[in-house]
């Protein structure tokens, strides 16, 4: 009986040891397979075009998509022969939205980083949490969609209260990796309160014509139906005033805190 107990004990110890070895090995395999580890996170090269003083270019930007509304926005942009930039979020980068993302690329628009996780408390949790967030979003776009972008826009902009007045420092860390920050100088205020078609258009028209190269903040999230309705009027009037619409791909950076 004693011998049997010894045998059982020995076998148990052996089993525990083997389990530890197997688990450790599996963890090692998982970490070497994780594409997000040990890869350099930096932006692709970007060429900035110098515009002549008379040139008027309007840069429409849509945050928080893509969604069903992006499809309608893409249709309108096509109709008006206009290009725009979409600052996307991680939640929306999913298989269901793959055709929309592919359409954005195919139709010559630009994609920029907005946030993988748009929850402010998480995105700005620590001094470096946003860098990890952007690294994740960047790699998902690159590896799953072949999109390499050098553009980013912080949730709430670089002057938002979660940056505690240190926007410039936060922006700098991304610039050091080659990314260009784009805040905005015109907003439709389409994600604040209860916007209407006329309130969005009024907000845009009040400021857009005071710039030769305005950057207009709008949204293409799933709740931005009013933005879609307001867009034709915006495209028409801005076009009538001699502007072309382009992506931010080749525009010089625009940052609230110490804009270049
Ligand atoms: Zn946003």
Image: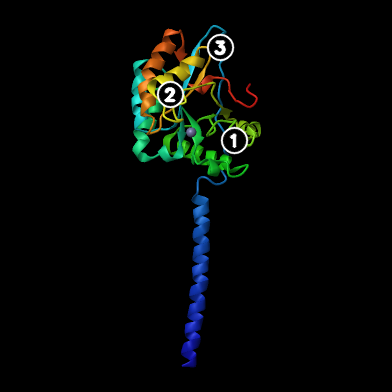
**How many residues crowd around disc 1 within 10 Å: few (fewer than 14), some, or many (20 or more)?**
few
Up-down: is 210 above or below 112?
above
Q: Quadrant of residue 129?
A: top right
Residue under the image location 54 percent in, 43 percent down:
121
Q: CA distance from mark 2 to mark 3?
A: 19 Å
Residue under the image location 64 percent in, 32 percent down:
172
In terms of sequence position, does the residue under pointer 2 or pointer 3 come before the other?
Answer: 3
Residue under the image location 57 percent in, 30 percent down:
179
Judged from the image, the secondary structure of the residue bearing numbered disc 2 is: loop
**How many residues crowd around disc 3 within 10 Å: few (fewer than 14), some, or many (20 or more)?**
few
Q: CA distance from mark 1 to mark 3?
A: 33 Å
Task: Compare residues 132 and 242 and report the one nearer the observer.
Answer: 242
Q: Which mark is residue 54?
A: none
**How many residues crowd around disc 2 within 10 Å: few (fewer than 14), some, or many (20 or more)?**
some
Which residue is under mark 2?
109
Q: Quadrant of the C terminus?
A: top right
In terms of sequence position, does the residue under pointer 1 or pointer 3 come before the other?
Answer: 3
Which residue is under mark 1?
161
Which residue is under mark 3?
51
Up-down: is 140 above or below 78?
below
> Percent position (x, y) of residue 156?
53, 33
């Amino acid at each position: 009986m004693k011998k049997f107990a010894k045998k059982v004990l020995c076998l148990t110890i052996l089993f525990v040891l083997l389990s530890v070895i197997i688990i450790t090995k599996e963890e090692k395999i998982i970490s070497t397979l994780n594409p997000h580890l040990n890869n350099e996170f930096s932006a692709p090269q970007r060429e900035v075009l110098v515009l002549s003083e008379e040139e008027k270019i309007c840069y429409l930007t849509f945050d928080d998509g893509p969604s069903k509304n992006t499809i309608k926005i893409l249709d309108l942009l096509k109709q008006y022969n206009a290009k725009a930039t979409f600052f996307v979020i991680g939640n929306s980068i999913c298989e269901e939205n793959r055709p929309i993302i592919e359409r954005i690329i195919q139709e010559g628009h630009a994609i920029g980083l907005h946030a993988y996780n748009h929850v402010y408390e998480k995105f700005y949790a620590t001094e470096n949490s946003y860098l990890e967030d952007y690294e994740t979003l960047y790699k998902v776009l690159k590896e799953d969609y072949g999109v390499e972008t050098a553009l980013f826009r912080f949730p709430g902009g670089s002057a938002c209260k979660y940056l505690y007045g240190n926007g410039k420092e936060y922006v700098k860390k991304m610039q050091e990796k080659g990314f260009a920050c784009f805040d905005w100088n015109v907003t439709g205020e389409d994600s604040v309160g209860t916007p209407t078609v006329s309130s969005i258009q009024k907000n845009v028209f009040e400021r857009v014509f005071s710039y030769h190269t305005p950057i207009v903040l709008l949204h293409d999230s799933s709740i931005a139906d009013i933005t879609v309705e307001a867009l034709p009027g915006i495209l028409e009037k801005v076009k009538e005033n001699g502007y072309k619409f382009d992506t931010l791909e080749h525009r010089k950076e625009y940052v609230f805190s110490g804009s270049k």
